[in-house]
Image (spheres, rainbow, N blue to C red):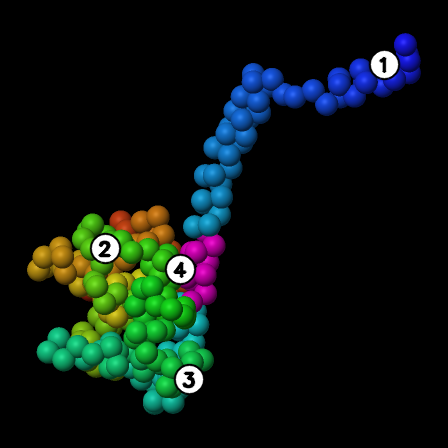
Amino acid sequence: MNIKNTLAQGRYSSDSRSLTLIELLVVIAIIAILAAMLLPSLAKARQMTYRTACQNNERQVGLALFSYANDCNSYMPPGGSPWSAIDENTSWEYKIWSYAGYKDNSYNCNRNCLRAHSKSSNVFQCPVTRMSPSVTTPTGNPANPNRTSYGLNTSLVGSWSLPIDIRAIRAPASASLVSESSFYLADYSGYWTTWTTSECFGLVPHEMNMNTLYFDMHVKPISYLQIPKTSSDVFWTGK
């Protein structure tokens, strides 16, 4: 007998033995436990990334609005056209499109404007509302079908067809300028209304929070319950 070969074979067999069924189940259980521990953290990190991207979007939108006002005697564009002739080409987003860094002729609602699921993203689209097909308003109703991600606070002038005079804002650090909305208005009636709850088209897509850009250009999240319910609040009027 070749003792050397016998020992070598024994050593090989011992080192290469297969896992038993119990050992395999233990490994799978450990992996499952680790995954369960990590998934909530990963989901939270993803939501924070979306929120930060959304806040950066609003800052860029704010810069575009102020650049527009600089060229228009301190007036920002009106929210849009009256209900009788709704047209996204008359919305405030369309009017500052080039100020946000896009080519004038690149605005196309079938390709890259404001609607969810458009083929090209832009700063007018929050990552959450861009990807989600079932965004709802704070009241639980479906979002406006023509939804954007952001709306202009037209309560500042009391009409969505009037331009906003930035010189009339008395409390820029407390007055909302742009908030998350499924329509291109984010005024008082977008969140609270005396008509029906279905008229509320504001959005709280960040774990029941919405990002708001203020006139002094700071952005912060506001929870649904913190949105002022009084139309005369400085948040809406700027005074």
Alpha carbon distance from label 4 to label 2:
16 Å
Q: Label 3 belongs to which residue?
A: 103
Mark positioned earlier in the residue sequence (4 or 2): 4
In the image shown, does 87 or 215 lie closer to the viewer?
A: 87
Alpha carbon distance from label 3 to label 4:
22 Å
In the image, the segment drawn in magenta is: 48-57
Circle 1 residues within 10 Å: few <14, some 14–19, many ≥20: few
Are the residues tagged 3 and 2 within 8 Å (C-beta)? no
- Mark 3 is on which residue type? Lys
Are the residues tagged 4 and 1 within 8 Å (C-beta)? no
Q: Label 4 belongs to which residue?
A: 127
Circle 2 residues within 10 Å: few <14, some 14–19, many ≥20: many
Mark positioned earlier in the residue sequence (1 or 2): 1
Q: Label 2 belongs to which residue?
A: 137
Alpha carbon distance from label 4 to label 1:
65 Å
Name above or below for residue 4 compared with residue 63: above
